[in-house]
Image (spheres, coloured by chain):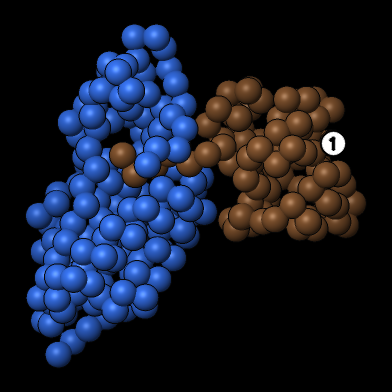
Chain colours: A brown, B blue
Amino acid sequence: MITVKYFAQLRQMAGREEDQFDLGAQATLDQLSDAIGLNLPKIGELVRDKKIMVSVNYDVVSADHIIKDGDEVALLPPFSGGA
Amino acid sequence: MSTTTETKARIQREDFSVTDEIEAIKKSSKNIGGIVIFLGTGRELNKGENISELNFEHYPKMAEKKLDEICTKAIEDYKIIDMSIIHRIGPIDIGENIVLIVAAGEHRKEAFEACEWAIAELKRTTPIWKRETTTKGEVWVQATP
């Protein structure tokens, strides 16, 4: 299972903090965005159009990253820490 | 001379004492000759809107990891002796402390440079989000300079 976490405005859009997806041993980000988009079309589109950053196991990854079973994926809206 | 490369970054709900954090970093080396701090506080106005409350959230583990990486890289790249970073989360009132960066070096130049770099890097790489409550409602803040 792949865990997908939503933060800030994405959590509010999703109405929950996380989802889990079974995409086999490995999957592309496009496959993941399709799976997210089934229930959350606007968020799936943001991921597919690369409008938000994506981290896997706490590091930001590029669009061609391969996600593996058991990974923790986070969808990250633009950061605004630091006062 | 005793020095340390141990980094000190943390995220917490409660307020912090700037004086205590400066005293703590001074203990890391007797060779510290200059300490520069950045203290970010909650301001009342943003883009003309009156803010009544701020609220910060973070991605646990990743945010702490990024702050640790900033401390480590600042020490390596700017040749400072030590750095600590504290960022608060949760509701924060206007005027309250939000973030503190303490850069300690042998001399002021590298401490100034490291501190300025660290706050810019924190804003760029650390998964922390700010929500402002204004008269028009709640707004998630986009990246600010």
> Which is nearer the eye, B1 or A50?
A50
Task: Name which residue lies at 36% across and 18% down.
Answer: B133
User: Label 1: which residue?
Assistant: A34
Disc 1 chain ID: A
Q: Is A18 left or right of A7, judged from the image as shown?
A: right
Q: Is B100 left or right of B64, judged from the image as shown?
A: left
Residue A55: give x, y in percent of width and height. Answer: 63, 51
SS at mark 1 in the image: helix
Quarter where residue B42 is shown: top left
Task: Name which residue lies at 61% across and 55% down.
Answer: A60
Q: Is residue B94 above or below residue B10?
A: above
Residue A5: give x, y in percent of width and height. Answer: 64, 40
Q: Where is the N terminus of chain B found, in terms of image quarters?
A: bottom left
Mark 1: amino acid: Asp
Quarter where residue A39 is shown: top right
Residue B13 can be seen in this image: no
